Amino acid sequence: MKIICVGRNYADHAKELKNDLPTTPVIFMKPKGALLLPGKQLYYPDFTQDLHYECELVLKICKNGKHIQEKFARKYYDQVTLGIDFTARDIQRAQQQKGLPWEIAKAFDGSAVAGTFAPIPEGMDVHDLHFQLLQNGNSVQDGHTRDMIFSIDHIIAYVSRFFTLNIGDMIFTGTPAGVGPVQRDDKLEGILEGKKVMEVEVR
Ligand code: MG
């Protein structure tokens, strides 16, 4: 199982981090060990002073494939939830300034939170979903999947040119604006189409 993530996929988020809009999807990965299972708490890592949440729609791959055409992409995912791409922002900035890879800022143990997956019901369009992140009960991110720069189906097609997609892989599809720091004892909740699907506490 691998975790594939898309960076800078919402224009308003790219802007808040002062990044240029990408012309092709920005892809990175997290190892299996980065996954924090539902019900587990995230322990604030000792290597960062600026741990940020990034709430994202997460898809689960249900069919193996490579070189998937965009028009057939929908056959390759069947479940959806919300997740958090936890990011050590201070380390990420330092790595970016030096032109170095991001893994120590984004792929550490527990950095990938996935909520409870649910089958995508007949008639639901994943390109038309509303989601929200609550931090201690206050709404801090409010996104809509139609605002993605690269659509889910485009991402599947693009990623599968480089990496074979396997059953069980997860794709984190990018975060909208509103990212920010977490503190110990924060509670984060993800609301997808009005329904709570994810919850995590920081210790
Ligand atoms: Mg992200």
Image (cartoon, rainbow, N blue to C red):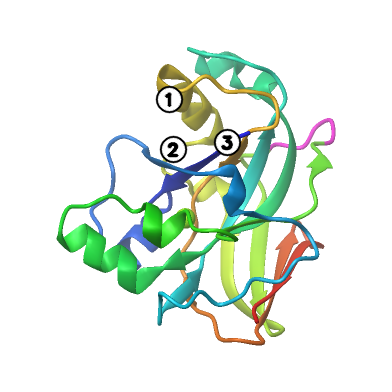
**Outermost residue, left direction?**
98
Distance CA(mark 1)–CA(mark 3):
16 Å
Disc 1 residue crowd, few under 14, some 14–19, many 20+, Cα 10 Å: many
SS category of the residue bearing label 3: loop
Say which mark, if any, is on residue 158: 1
The image shows residue 41, relative to residue 170, as above or below, that is below
CA–CA distance between discs 2 and 1?
10 Å
| Residue 14 located left or right of residue 128 | left
Q: Disc 2 designates what residue?
A: 150
Q: Quadrant of residue 76?
A: top right
Q: Does any atom of ligand 1 lie closer than 8 Å to the CB of label 2?
A: no
In the picture, which quadrant includes the C terminus? bottom right
Estimate how packed mark 2 is, as few (under 14), some (14 to 19) or many (20 or more) residues with alpha carbons within 10 Å.
Answer: many
Q: Which residue is mark 3?
A: 2
Q: Which amino acid, mark 2? A: Phe
Q: Nearer the viewer, residue 148 or 101?
A: 101
Q: Which numbered mark, 3 or 2, is in the foreground of this view? A: 3
Residue stretch in magenta: 121-125
* CA distance separating discs 3 and 2: 20 Å
Q: Is residue 17 visible?
A: no
Percent from the top left, x then y, of residue 124? 77, 37
Label total for image: 3
Can residue 120 be seen in the rendering of this structure?
Answer: yes
Which three-letter amino acid code belongs to the residue tagged 3? Answer: Lys
Can you give x and y, in whole percent of width and height, for residue 169 in the image?
63, 33
The x, y position of residue 32, in whole percent, is 60, 43
In this rendering, which labeled residue sits more in front, label 2 or label 1?
1
The secondary element bearing badge 2 is classed as loop
The earlier-in-sequence mark between 2 and 1 is 2
